[in-house]
Each structure stands twice: as C-alpha cells, then as structure tokens.
Image (tube, rainbow, N blue to C red):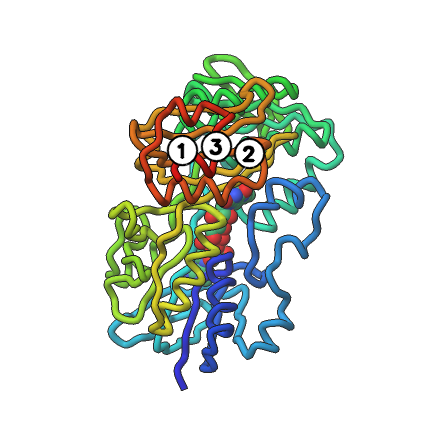
Amino acid sequence: MAHYVIVGGGLAAGTAVEKLRDEGFDGDLTVVAAEQHPPYQRPPLSKGFLAGEEGRDAVILHDAAWYEEKGVGLRTGVTATSLEPAGQSLALDDGSTLTYDALLLATGSSPRRLPLDGADLEGVRTLRTLDDSDALAAELRGGGRRLVLIGSGWIGMEVAATAKTLGNEVTVLERGRVPLEAALGEDMGAVFRDLHLEKGVDLRASVQVERIAGAGRVSGVFVDGEEIPADLVVIGVGAVPNVSLAERAGIDVDNGIVVDERLRTDASNIFAAGDVANAYHPVIQRHLRSEHWDNALKAGEVAARSMLGMPASHDSIPYFYTDQFDLGMELSGYPPLMKDARVVTRGDVATREFIAFWHDGTRIVGAMNVNVWDVQEQLQRLIRDAAPVTADALRDGSIALNELAP
Ligand code: FAD
C-alpha cells in the first residue's frame, strides 16, 4: 500500500490531508508536525483568538479524533530532521525513520530575527504559533501594559490594533515612511497609518531602533537616542521560509523551495506547498512565494491532487485579508506586477470605504476592497480577464464593476 507523508502542521498540511482523503486516497498517510497541536490556521492568533473573542475551535482545523477516524497517523511534537530523496526516507527526531512513496513539505515559515542588543530579554516576543499567541494574550488581555511593536507589517499592525482595543498603551516603530509600504505602497499604507493614529496608537515612522533595554526583563526600546518605556516588545519584521530540511536534501531552494505549477520539487515524488514554496505561477509566468492563508489553503489542495497524479495547477490570484479596529480589507493581485502599477481609487478613502485598483496603464493587476463587501469575485475576475480598462473608468463609481470590462 502506498505511503504518503506530509511534513508540517499548518494550513497547507491540514488541507492536503483533507483533500487526499476526499479524492479517495486510501493508502497510508502520516503527518509529521513539530508543534504539539494538530494542524491549525494562524490568522486568528493576532486577531480574535488573541483578543479572547474566539477559541481554539476557530484555530484548529480538526481535532485528533478526526485524524484517527480518517486513518491518518498524526505525529505531533515530532520534527523531521533529515530527508534522503534517493532512498525515499525521512528521519524524525524521535529516532524513527519513515519511507514514503510521495512526500509533501509544508514546513511554513518562521519569524525573522533581529540582531538587536536586548532581543533575548524576557518580555521580547515574536508571534507565530498558538503557544506564542496564548502567552501574549496572557499579558495583554488585562490591559494597562505598555507594548512596543518593532515593525509595521501585517502582524505588527494587527497585534497593535488588538492590543489597543484590549486597553493597552501601544507604540509601533517603523523604519519606512508608512506602515505596510512594501505590500501596499505609500498612499495605501497611509490609510492604515491614519487609522492607527486615530485610534490612539503611537505610530512612529522613519525611525531607527537602536537596542532593547532591560535587566533580565525588557524595560524599554531605544529609538534615535530616545528610550520608549515598554513592559512588552513584539518583533514583527517578516518571516523566513523553513527550507533547511529541503536544502540539506539537495532540493532546489531559492527564496523558498522551488516548485513548478503542480507544486513538484526537482526531487522525484517530493512536493512543497504553502509559505515555504516558491511556486511557478502559470498566469504571470514567474515564481511567486506567498505568505498568506488563502495560498496555504489552495496550495494544500493542489499538492494533494498533484501527489495523486490528477490534473493540478496552482494558478489562483494571490489573496489576503486583514481586520484592524473597524477596518476590514481584502486584497487580490500579483505583487510583482503591483510594484510598478499606479493606484486608482473609487469610493471614499477619507471614511475608509473604498476600492483601490493597481492599474498598470492598461489593465488591473491588483485590487483591494476596504469596508466594501461582496466584491472580491468581481475584482478577481477583472484581474484574471486582464481586459483593457481606463483609470478614469475605475475611478467612476457610477460604472458598475461588472461593466468595467465586459
Ligand atoms: P505554517 O502555518 O507556518 O505551518 C508550518 C508548520 O510546519 C509549523 O507548525 C512548523 O512547526 C512545522 N514544521 C516546520 N518544519 C518542520 C519539520 N522539519 N518537521 C515537522 N514540522 C515542521 N494570512 C492571511 O492571508 N491573512 C491573515 O489575516 C493572516 N494572519 C496571520 C496572523 C499571524 C499571527 C500569522 C503568524 C500568520 C498570518 N497569516 C495570515 C499568514 C498565514 O497564517 C500563513 O500564510 C499560513 O500559516 C501558512 O501556512 P503553512 O501551512 O504554509 O505554514
């Protein structure tokens, strides 16, 4: 009987397991997951779960009993330590070795570390895992703490919003001109800056963090010569893909594990999906590594079909969402194409109810709806169809989205 093995305990691993069984794979299936939890999704960890509004059921995809019922060997708290593609075998840190017929690497990513003095003091944290979120929640839920966030990417901004809503004093330190500049550009980053400033977050842009101070426990962060007092510091400066297992096995790695549109690595019967995979996108004809929930969800399914030899192509438009204070947003688009595009808006940016389009001069390569709902399907269709549309038509709210490029 065939044995398929999945390494990882995140959303890509979880959806791959589900899809393999849904598609009728009845061979042996083993999941090797370093964390102590069954596969789970991370978005609530900086939002509802951190705030105490959502419980573990919003995070964990299926409990251990589900895996048992599906005949899946779920090995939590176990790390895969080395992989030998030639012998189709995988060594685990509990001393055992698995042989496989097909293997999926869904090892995700880890918080980028900052080589800062004081980064190892007690009270200096990163946020990636359920346990990280539990620990942070224990400090923030009572309110009244002074939290300093280093970095204003998605996780930093979401934690800032949640912590502020819970009644903490929040400072965000950012090296760039506005938060989220790399993802959204300056104008749209300014929308998030203004939101946080209005809600009372002390957001400081264009600053250089010098060191974290404290004796045993953190007491402050030095920025451009000034000390900002802190009870707690969260470093959120991006993530790096967990490629070491693949790299040591001689698999092609370049900004993640390099895979084709069927999510196959260059080693036979080894696939990769989720944050760790740098996958060829057949529409834009280049490789993309996406660190988003929707990517992990869809890639897990595509990988399962690909492992089964079924038609499979990871060709969806990258999609992301966030919730911060009273702002909800969805964003679809191809980041490499959005970089050089011009942003055109319709609706009211000042009241934060609008759609922003990334227009490359001819067509839409990205679109973000802010507090405007049920439009993603149409926005994705506009991006997918790549039909010519003018910037004036995009700005004109009297032209319905489905009439923009008939
Ligand atoms: P991961 O979720 O990182 O899972 C990988 C797992 O593999 C980890 O548990 C790891 O321990 C395990 N592993 C690694 N190496 C080994 C090994 N050798 N052996 C065994 N196990 C191993 N995206 C959005 O689109 N919207 C959001 O609002 C959003 N919010 C987020 C909030 C937070 C706090 C975080 C951290 C991420 C958020 N994301 C969001 C991103 C999204 O959660 C990720 O893109 C997604 O988790 C990627 O899933 P994955 O399965 O590829 O990897």
User: Residue sitting at 62 percent across and 24 percent down?
Assistant: 170
In the rendered structure, the answer to whether residue 60 lies left or right of residue 394 reads right
Residue type (three-letter) at the residue carrying disc 1? Pro
For this rendering, which residue is in front, 88 or 146?
88
Closer to us: mark 3 or mark 1? 3
Assess disc 2: are there few (<14), some (14-19) or many (≥20) residues with their C-alpha within 10 Å of its C-alpha.
Answer: many
Q: Can residue 232 be seen in this view?
A: no
Cβ atoms under marks 3 and 1 closer than 8 Å:
no
What residue is pinned by disc 3?
Answer: 153
For this rendering, which residue is in front, 207 or 306?
306
Assess disc 1: are there few (<14), some (14-19) or many (≥20) residues with their C-alpha within 10 Å of its C-alpha.
Answer: few
Assess disc 3: are there few (<14), some (14-19) or many (≥20) residues with their C-alpha within 10 Å of its C-alpha.
Answer: some
Q: Is residue 141 above or below residue 179?
A: below
What residue is pinned by disc 2?
Answer: 234
Is disc 2 placed on a helix, strand or loop? strand
In the rendered structure, the answer to whether residue 23 lies left or right of residue 233 reads left
C-alpha span from label 2 to label 1: 14 Å
Q: Is residue 226 visible?
A: yes
C-alpha span from label 3 to label 2: 12 Å
Spot the residue most to the top: 225
Q: Residue 115 carries which label?
A: 1
Q: In this view, does 395 lie above or below 85?
A: above
